[in-house]
Structure formats: structure tokens, C-alpha cells
Image: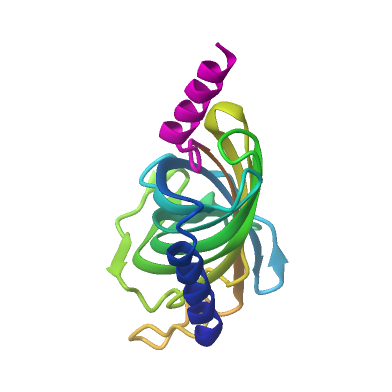
Amino acid sequence: MKKLILSLLIVAATFFTSQAQNKVYATSSLEMIFSFAQTNNNGTPGGNILRWAPVFNVQVFGNADFGKHFGLIFGGAVRNVGFIYQVPDTNINLKKKYRNYNLAIPIGFKIGNMHKFLFFGGYEIEFPFHYKEKTFINNAKQDNKITAWFSPRVPSFYNSAFLGVQFPYGFTLKFKYYFSEFFNQNYTQSDGVQPYKGFKANVWYISLSFAMFKNNHIYYKEKAEKKADYY
């Protein structure tokens, strides 16, 4: 896997540096995430609740446009990703909230009008660097909150894929699925307990953003040139 990721990064870097005649530029945007999870807790499915994460999700992309209808993307992001789990079949209302802050490296492609309507997709690897877990009983937050930097409760990295569409004027809708499970099921506490053993959870989300790949400088420059040619 590491060799594959390194190869993809080398290919992207080669395209970005060797195609000077094409348009190479940077874009950035914020992302509003609505996340879910496909869960199975030791044979018991379900229990997932929508999680809304409007902050802190920042992404920066390098764009290499090879003509008007195809381009490559490569960048970095910081994302707030997790899910809410309503424990089923209990006599009390027990709810758990899990989340990671991840450092992400995406690589992918764009097809369509590079500064208006386009489709995009690709692969992304994410490295979790801050974990948080909170417990609620009958909607009352408990005092056993868990926070940790580079926690062994979760894997060292996640593999994921994304697909999306950017509409005219820059509004973007994206779907993303994590192939890696959210928890490290082998994690063992100091008392010998494995709290996530048998708890399978794969996060997926839908997100909204604006001007993720839209280079306003080039877009308005092209628009002005077309207007000048018309007159």
C-alpha cells in the first residue's frame, strides 16, 4: 500500500511540474460534512445517527488542467470526521460520539468544464492525529470523555475514495466512503479490556463546499477576454 501511495504521489508531481504549458494553479475551500457509518457491533447492526460537522474542515488543492475538459488534482486537508452511535437494545438511552481530526492527502481527476460544471473523483489517505470519544446517558453528557493525540484506539491511517460534482458558480457536492474501519479492534486498555472488539464501523459522508476547484482569477480573465473579442 505504501509503495502504491508513493507511486501515485510521484506521478502527480511529475504531471504538475512537467506540464508548464497547461494551467497549474491552487484552490482552497471549507467543507461542511454530514457523516454516517455502516455499523455492526458484535453481530448487532444499526444504531447510527447523522453527525453534522461544519468545522474544522479545510482543504487546499493543486490543479493541473490539461485543456478545457480534463484535469488532475492533488492536495492536503484537515478534516473533522466521525459518527454518532445510539446503542441498540438497552434499557437506557445510551449514545456515543466518536470523532477524529485527520490530516488528508487526496489525489484524483476532474472531467468537464474546469471552472464551471465538472465531475471529480479519486483516492484519499487520511492520518488521524486527534481522537475524541464522548458518552451520553439519557441525553446527559458523562464525565468519562476520552481525548488523545495519535490514539492507538484507531488505525494509523484510513483509505478512502470520493466522487463529486461541482456546479456552475462553484457549489460542490461530494460523497466519500472509508474502506478502513474506524476503530482499531485490537486496542487493549491497561485493565485488559478491548472496548472495540467486534465493533465494525465504516464511515461515509456527504459534504457541501464552495469553489473547491474553481479558479476565479482564470475564470474571470477568460470571461473578460471573450467579452473583448466580442466587441
Q: Quadrant of residue 102?
A: bottom left
Q: Residue at x 65, y 63 (%)?
A: 39
Does the rendering let one see residue 96? no
The answer to whether 51 is drawn above or below residue 6 in the figure is above
The answer to whether 27 is drawn above or below residue 18 in the figure is above
Position in image of residue 121 (x %, y %): 63, 55
Q: Residue at x 49, y 54 (%)?
A: 21
Q: With 178 as the anchor, is 155 left or right in this view? A: left
Residue 231 versus residue 148: which sits nearer the camera?
231
Is 20 part of what is drawn in magenta?
no
Position in image of residue 30 (x %, y %): 41, 41
Is 229 part of what is drawn in magenta?
yes
Residue 76 versus residue 83: which sits nearer the camera?
76
Looking at the figure, which quarter contains the N terminus? bottom right
Q: Which residues are magenta?
A: 210-231
The answer to whether 104 is drawn above or below residue 197 in the figure is above
Q: Residue at x 56, y 22 (%)?
A: 226
Does the rendering let one see residue 17? yes
Position in image of residue 140 (x %, y %): 39, 44
Q: Residue at x 44, y 83 (%)?
A: 187
Residue 169 versus residue 42: which sits nearer the camera?
169
Which scheme is used to colour this image of the protein? rainbow
Magenta stretch: helix, strand or loop mostly: helix
Position in image of residue 38 (x %, y %): 66, 60
